[in-house]
């Protein structure tokens, strides 16, 4: 049996993946299709940034209006944005992109051949790239597109549907990233200097999924939440400033690719985790497994971030599995409804205006009711693109050709408002919006546009 091709995030992302007969790849922030690995030769005298970090060598290409000052506004500091739900604060989006498309400010080359997601804070864009046998955490000036600094670290191995797939998380002047092998880094956001580092495998006994880690690290107050998976505990909570372990627990399932969700359900603070074989709720105080609902898919791929709506949680997976509404009552949970309306291989859905909007195999953009799973409308042609909600509008990628489509977030029917193609080519990573800018990537480039 063949599975559809499928990974940052940041993440969230974000931040994997799919192939034939369990050789495909999914990522929370986005996967990739096979392609030539980036070159491994470094420049003889690479430029350096603050604290001696090697600066990524591919300069940004300014376009008309490039270098415009950043005047402030909302940020996108983690996978799925400031609220972790793919819904952006207002950006004043008014233009019809078919007649007045956003103007490109700059474009910067990417060499990771993949889909790691960008994040933005304080006028800087942060993203994981890859060169040779190293990952590179890049800090790019939002106004000019130039690298402010880049910090490399060893991450050997070949291109396996791209390299790192998660999205950085920025909080309190620090940047948190997680590599595909589970190397967790905390860097100074201004200089790129390393503050601390941990390994999900060696420090937490982590059991990564088949195509390696993809979930994005998440800051919750003074904590950093990650998902090592395995016999020592599904979830690990760290002091975000020192990296010291606060607790590890939540059962022994192996990790999958979805980013954890902090939530308060029925008055209990918990972390909702979509792992390799189940959906689980883990107490934020001490890591006790509160509840667990089995959910097994082909190749143990559960990559789309769960949507928490009160006591109900929407989950969705590919591999012809579908979606479900899970009802949580205290320390128990059960599936309230299940269908195949949204089969998201990795693209996370959004909850807006009491309705769910998501993209799933075989490429449908779907609006459904989270209470009963009733499908309100469906539109094909979106392949495996990501989406966000901005000013009552879905910004949904057509994953195969890179067209970014404006669709009204309206349950009464599919209403396309406009579209443009920012970069073209395979575009699975959801766009982000920050400080009046639209930031997108495909497999080879990252670009910034002025929102109209």
Image (spheres, rainbow, N blue to C red):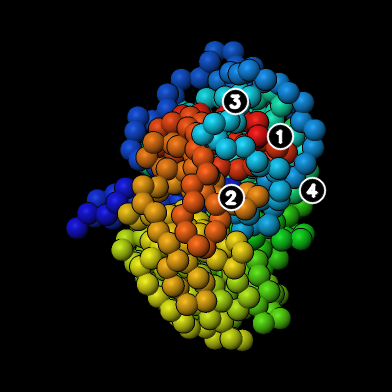
Q: CA distance from mark 3 to mark 1?
A: 17 Å
Dot in front, 4 or 2? 2
Q: Residue at x 71, y 50 (%)?
A: 89
Question: Which residue carries the number 3 mark?
Answer: 104
Question: Looking at the picture, does residue 291 appear above or below residue 148?
Answer: below
Q: Find residue 124 and name its label.
A: 1
Q: Return the residue nearer the eye: 328 or 342.
A: 342
Question: Which residue carries the number 4 mark?
Answer: 172
Crowd tier of the residue under label 1, counting other residues whose Cα lies within 10 Å: few below 14, some 14–19, many 20 or above:
many
Q: Is residue 47 left or right of residue 302?
A: right
Question: Looking at the picture, does residue 299 appear above or below residue 363?
Answer: below
In what quadrant of the picture does the C terminus appear? top right
Q: Is residue 269 left or right of residue 279?
A: right
CB under 8 Å between callouts 4 and 3?
Answer: no
Dot in front, 1 or 4? 1
Q: Residue at x 43, y 50 (%)?
A: 16
Question: Which residue carries the number 2 mark?
Answer: 393
In what quadrant of the picture does the N terminus appear? bottom left
């Amino acid at each position: 049996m063949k599975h559809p091709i499928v990974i940052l995030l940041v993440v969230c992302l974000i931040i994997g993946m799919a192939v034939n007969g369990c050789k495909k790849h999914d990522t929370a922030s986005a996967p990739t299709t096979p392609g030539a690995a980036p070159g491994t030769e470094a420049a003889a005298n690479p430029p350096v940034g603050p604290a001696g970090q090697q600066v990524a060598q591919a300069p940004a290409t300014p376009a008309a209006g490039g270098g415009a000052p950043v005047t402030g506004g909302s940020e996108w500091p983690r996978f799925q944005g400031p609220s972790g739900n793919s819904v952006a604060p207002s950006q004043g989006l008014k233009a019809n992109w078919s007649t007045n498309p956003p103007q490109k400010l700059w474009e910067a080359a990417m060499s990771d051949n993949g889909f790691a997601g960008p994040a933005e804070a304080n006028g800087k864009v942060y993203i994981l790239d890859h060169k040779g046998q190293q990952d590179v955490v890049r800090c790019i000036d939002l106004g000019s597109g130039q690298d402010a600094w880049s910090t490399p670290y060893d991450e050997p191995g070949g291109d396996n549907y791209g390299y790192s797939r998660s999205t950085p998380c920025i909080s309190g002047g620090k940047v948190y990233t997680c590599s595909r092998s589970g190397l967790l880094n905390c860097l100074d956001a201004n200089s790129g200097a390393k503050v601390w580092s941990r390994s999900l495998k060696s420090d937490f006994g982590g059991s990564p999924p088949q195509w390696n880690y993809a979930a994005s690290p998440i800051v919750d107050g003074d904590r950093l939440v990650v998902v090592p998976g395995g016999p020592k505990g599904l979830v690990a909570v760290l002091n975000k400033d020192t990296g010291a372990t606060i607790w590890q627990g939540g059962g022994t399932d192996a990790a999958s690719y979805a980013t954890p969700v902090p939530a308060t359900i029925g008055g209990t603070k918990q972390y909702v985790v979509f792992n390799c074989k189940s959906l689980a709720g883990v107490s934020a105080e001490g890591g006790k497994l509160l509840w667990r609902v089995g959910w097994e898919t082909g190749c143990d791929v559960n990559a789309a971030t769960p949507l928490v709506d009160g006591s109900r949680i929407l989950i969705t997976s590919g591999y012809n599995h579908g979606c479900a509404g899970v009802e949580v009552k205290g320390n128990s949970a059960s599936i309230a409804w299940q269908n195949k309306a949204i089969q998201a291989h990795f693209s996370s859905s959004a909850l807006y205006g009491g309705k769910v909007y998501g993209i799933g195999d075989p490429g449908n953009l779907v609006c459904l009711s989270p209470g009963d799973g009733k499908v309100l409308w469906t539109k094909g042609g979106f392949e495996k693109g990501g989406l966000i909600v901005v000013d009552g509008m879905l910004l949904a990628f057509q994953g195969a050709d890179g067209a970014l489509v404006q669709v009204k977030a309206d349950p009464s029917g599919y209403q396309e408002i406009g579209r443009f193609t920012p970069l073209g080519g395979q575009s699975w990573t959801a766009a982000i919006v920050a400080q009046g800018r639209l930031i997108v990537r495909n497999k080879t480039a990252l670009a910034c546009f002025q929102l109209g």
